[in-house]
Image (spheres, rainbow, N blue to C red):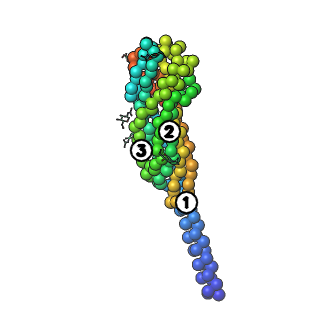
Amino acid sequence: METKKSLKICCAVTSILLLLLVITLLILYFTVLKPKKPAVVATPVGLDHIDFSLRPNVSLTLSIRMNISIKNPNYAGFKYENSSASIFYGGDFVGETPIEAGVIHARSIKNISTVVNIIANKVIGNPKFFPDVFKGSLNMNSEMGMEGKVILLGIFKLHAKTHSTCDIAIFVWQGNSTENCNSKIEL
Ligand SMILES: *[C@@H]1O[C@H](CO)[C@@H](O)[C@H](O)[C@H]1NC(C)=O
Ligand SMILES: *[C@@H]1O[C@H](CO)[C@@H](O)[C@H](O)[C@H]1NC(C)=O
Ligand SMILES: *[C@@H]1O[C@H](CO)[C@@H](O)[C@H](O)[C@H]1NC(C)=O
Ligand SMILES: *[C@@H]1O[C@H](CO)[C@@H](O)[C@H](O)[C@H]1NC(C)=O
Ligand SMILES: *[C@@H]1O[C@H](CO)[C@@H](O)[C@H](O)[C@H]1NC(C)=O
């Protein structure tokens, strides 16, 4: 009789402890370990170089400076694949800068400062080019996508796909630019 009773108590205590352990793990998972989406913001920050002339021939040399910030909010590393920031003019691809694969440590921000060289022939060959030149500005967009994995204790691997876009107006006669990022992600 006595052993049966103590066995019951033992069982109950064990169950309670197991339940507490499960609850603790669940709370830990949803607060600390739950993978959160990294944020990528690629912002054009001005012209690195511009050379434009209509005579004797139409010529354009253009490169745009971009600052890229990647924020990893996780309590684990974010491993990202080879990616690139691209520039489009009138919907056509006109240049990109490669971002080599890497790792961002837990809860940190990595800033990359880079330059995109624009493929001039693709810009000059666009039907929008001459009308835009006479209006005074070339309107381009930048786009940045990144894919990677959040590695949590080597158990969970989550894909994170992030995107950011900006509009850039290039004033070819003044040789400067304005940038407007409508999809700005808070860092
Ligand atoms: C302008 O273009 C013409 C014909 O395409 C070429 O012969 C000439 O060398 C070019 N001039 C310059 C300054 O690039
Ligand atoms: C872009 O990055 C460079 C180098 O990190 C920094 O000096 C500059 O202030 C940044 N520009 C902007 C607009 O954040
Ligand atoms: C990433 O880029 C580097 C250098 O450009 C290259 O050596 C490597 O093979 C690329 N990795 C993948 C998975 O494409
Ligand atoms: C990276 O950029 C962000 C936002 O532009 C800034 O708040 C942060 O201080 C920068 N970090 C480093 C290490 O430069
Ligand atoms: C571009 O340059 C012109 C003159 O050089 C100046 O008046 C204008 O304010 C500049 N615009 C921007 C966006 O910096």
Of the image marks 1 and 3, the number of the one nearer the N terminus = 3
Q: Position of residue 127 (x, y in %)?
A: 57, 18
Compute the Cα span from label 1 to label 3: 24 Å
**Residue at 39% from the left image edge and 17% from the top image edge:** 174
**Residue at 57% from the left image edge and 49% from the top image edge:** 159
Of the image marks 2 and 1, the number of the one nearer the N terminus = 2
Q: Secondary structure at mark 1?
A: loop
Instruction: Determine if the C-beta at disc 3 is less than 8 A from ligand 4.
Output: yes
Compute the Cα span from label 3 to label 2: 15 Å
Work out which quarter of the rendered image holds the C terminus and state it: top left
Circle nearer the viewer, 2 or 1: 2
Q: Amino acid at mark 1?
A: Ile
Query: Can residue 141 be seen from the camera position used here?
Result: no
Instruction: Determine if the C-beta at disc 2 is less than 8 A from ligand 3.
Output: no
* Label 1, residues with CA under 10 Å away: few <14, some 14-19, many ≥20: few
Callouts 3 and 2 close, C-beta under 8 Å: no
Q: Amino acid at mark 2?
A: Ser
The quarter of the rendering in which ligand 2 is drawn is top left
Q: Which residue is mark 3?
A: 110
Q: Which residue is mark 2?
A: 84
**Residue at 55% from the left image edge and 60% from the top image edge:** 155
Q: Which mark is residue 155?
A: 1
Instruction: Determine if the C-beta at disc 1 is less than 8 A from ligand 3.
Output: no
Q: Amino acid at mark 3?
A: Lys
